[in-house]
Amino acid sequence: MTKRQLLGILVIAILLVTGVIARLLIGRDPAVGGVHFNWPDENIFLLRFGAVRSAIVGGACLGLSGLLLQALLRNPLASPFILGLSAGAGLGAMIAAWSASVVGTGSVAWISFIAHGADGVIPGTVGSLSVLVLVYALGRRGGRLDPLTLVLAGTVVATICGALTLLVQSLMPPSSRGDSWMWFMGQVPELPSSGAMWTAIALLFCAFIASFQSGAALDVSSTGDDEAESLGVSLRSLRILLFICAGALASASVALCGPIAFVGFVAPHLCRLLIGSRHRALVPASVIAGAAILVWADAVRQSIDVGAGRLPIGVLTALIGGPVFLMVMRSRRMRAGEWSC
Amino acid sequence: MLKIDSLSFHYGRRSALKEITASCDAGKVVALVGRNGSGKSTLLRAIAGLAHPSGGSVSWRGQRLAGLAPARRALEVAYVSQRPSLSIDLTVHEMIALGRFAAKTRLDSILRIDQAIGLMGLDALKERSFHELSAGEQQRCVIARALAQHETNGLLALDEPFSNLDPGETMRVVGALQQSAQAGALVVVAMHDLSLVDRVAENVWWLEQGQMIAAGAPIDVLTPTKLEEIFHCEFVRGAQGLTLAARV
């Protein structure tokens, strides 16, 4: 790695560490309201540390998933949220939870495994990959992937998945609807499900290794299909492997935190600004940046008091990510058509 | 030796190449000529092993290129497409270094990259962003990448490499391709500038509507009468080679 890349990764790591410290120090007293900056007692510390763990793992999954989608689709606007992968994962997990509540899967081991697999990660992955295949097919125009058509297709498919998720949710027993509402809005849980947490960590580890190893191939694949193949990259294998990684990471983050907007979009762009475009460096940087952004968003959320409880995390990430998305969409390179395949 | 045997290719129902048979030994430059849409690019992609034929085969030194894994094929064939593209931000040096992705040794790679940069006259531009270059400079950059990639006795397939170049840079690229051929490579170039064919190539393959209508030495194949019949333009062959006389 070059000096610039190492320095960039160090800056992002410092951002993460300061975010963790901020999140551990910032607290709110539910009885009297207001924001406190103090080192918490043990019980409160465990809650805040739980939120930090959720934000680090969920954000890291989103950051890497976003980077892989942007690289594989050669589209700077791609992210798991914008392309509908998060919504697809949410729908998959919700259908699995609903079918488990209707069928009563406890007695049949394989149905139970499919329905609850790793606290929703397995059905979520099926949902996110199905959406990816659909959006990929819809995003093609004249045999080529058009960046804006892809985003449009993703937005529409995400809206349909969101509506279907609400429909399935309304079919569920009233007792479990409250939890799923919170999850549907996006959250950083202070008491994360251990199944989802450990599955996400395992997936993140495997996807990180696969992506890091494929870093040079990702650089080559940015030259176009024919060129990449002629330079020695097996695009088919690369895409199958890394699309599965991107889908599974999106699903893991959704199972852990619900659908959270724009973290997977902003993290890779922030890293490119700091360290350039080489994927060997972007992979670790995007993992750390995704974690840092979500930890900081959660910390800032704690310190904003709008008089009606805490802000949903998705509000903050969308307020930051939305303008960045518009800036990239209006950028010179997008207008010049340099981002297309 | 490159051997093309009854090669056919279809885009859906449309036939792009029909029963093409040709062969050429290493150490030569072959020019692929023909009108727009005659099948030059498709034939070049098939030669590079990138387009899987619907019939027939292409073999290079006895191996079917389309059947090889990309990493293995990249050691045999380097390909330059008609429109260079890059979706990330790389410097000229980084872009050319991508040519050594499939290479086994790093030390040799550094030398090959520097040689290719020098051959294409890109020394002063090597730290510039690829996206900041003019179309002609980008073209030289991807040709340099192919030169860095291909082995001395390999196959170089280039699709209209002179399209954005000024006369000086065109002659620089012509020189580099001839140098590669003299070193033992086979160079196949799809091109439109017929006045250049005499200077570049020993052999011409002429395609028309997906069929090879003539093959041989430029002076035998590109006759003014035949050219006028196909292109509806008047050509003159003089001491300077083939030139376009006037539009009819």
Image: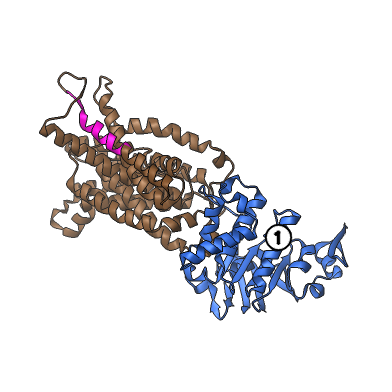
Chain colours: A brown, B blue
Q: Which residue is mark 1?
A: B172
Tell me the crowding category of disc 1: few under 14, some 14 to 19, or many 20 or more residues within 10 angstroms, Cα based: some
Dot 1 falls on a residue whose secondary structure is helix
Magenta region, main secondary structure: helix
Residue B117 image offset from top left, x and y in percent: 60, 58
- Please give left or right for residue B78 compared with residue A62 in the image: right
Does the image show residue A161? Answer: yes
Is A239 inside the magenta-drawn segment?
A: no
Residue B79 image offset from top left, x and y in percent: 59, 64
Residue at horizontal 35 percent and vertical 51 percent from the top = A247
Q: Which contiguous range is marked in magenta?
A: A15-29
Residue A264 image offset from top left, x and y in percent: 37, 42
Residue at horizontal 40 percent and vertical 39 percent from the top = A266
Q: Label 1: chain?
A: B
Q: Nearer the viewer, residue B125 or A194?
A: B125
Q: Nearer the viewer, residue B100 or B3?
A: B100
Q: Which kind of residue does numbered mark 1 sit on?
A: Arg
Does the image show residue B38? Answer: no
Which residue is farthest left? Answer: A42
Is A26 inside the magenta-drawn segment?
A: yes
Residue B224 image offset from top left, x and y in percent: 86, 68
Please identify the quarter of the rendering in which residue A176 is found.
top left
Residue at horizontal 21 percent and vertical 29 percent from the top = A25
